[in-house]
Image: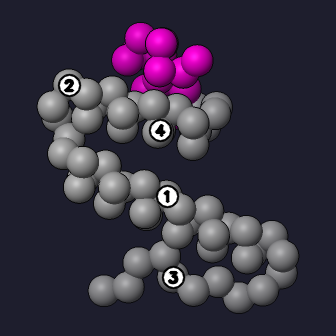
Amino acid sequence: MAADLPLGTLLTGIARGRGANEMMLALLALLHDKGVLTEGEVRQVVQVLAADMRDFQVELQGGPAEPALKG
C-alpha cells in the first residue's frame, strides 16, 4: 500500500507520474496525520484533483472541458 512507503518514495513516485492519484491521496493523508495539513486543506486539494480528473475524462470523450477552477 502506498501509505506504507517512505515519504521520499511517495514524492519520487508523484514526480514521475507513477500511481499519481493514489500516491497523492496517500501523501495528503500522511501530511494530515502529521498535522501539516488541516482536514479542510486536504478536502480542497481533493476537490481540485477530482475536478481535473473530470475535465480529463471529458477531453477523452471528445467534448469541451470547463476549467477546473474559475477565478
| SS of the residue under disc 2 | loop
Quarter of image, res 27: top left
4 and 1 marks in contact (CB < 8 Å): yes
Is residue 38 rendered to the left or right of residue 16? left
**In 3D space, how far apart are the residues under numbered discs 3 and 4 (Cα atoms)?**
21 Å
Question: Would residue 21 be visible to someone looking at this image?
Answer: yes
3 and 4 marks in contact (CB < 8 Å): no
3 and 1 marks in contact (CB < 8 Å): no
Mark sitting on residue 41:
none
Mark sitting on residue 24:
4
Q: Dot 3 corresponds to which residue?
A: 67
Give the amino acid type for the residue marked by disc 4 in the picture. Met
| SS of the residue under disc 4 | helix
User: Where is residue 10 drawn, in percent x and y?
Assistant: 47, 23
Mark sitting on residue 49:
1
| SS of the residue under disc 1 | helix
Give the amino acid type for the residue marked by disc 3 in the picture. Pro
**In 3D space, how far apart are the residues under numbered discs 2 and 4 (Cα atoms)?**
15 Å
Quarter of image, res 31: top left
Along the viewing direction, whichever of 46 and 16 lies nearer the viewer:
46
Residue in view at x 57 percent, y 36 percent? 22
User: Where is residue 59 drawn, in percent x and y?
Assistant: 74, 75
Q: Is residue 25 above or below residue 34?
A: below
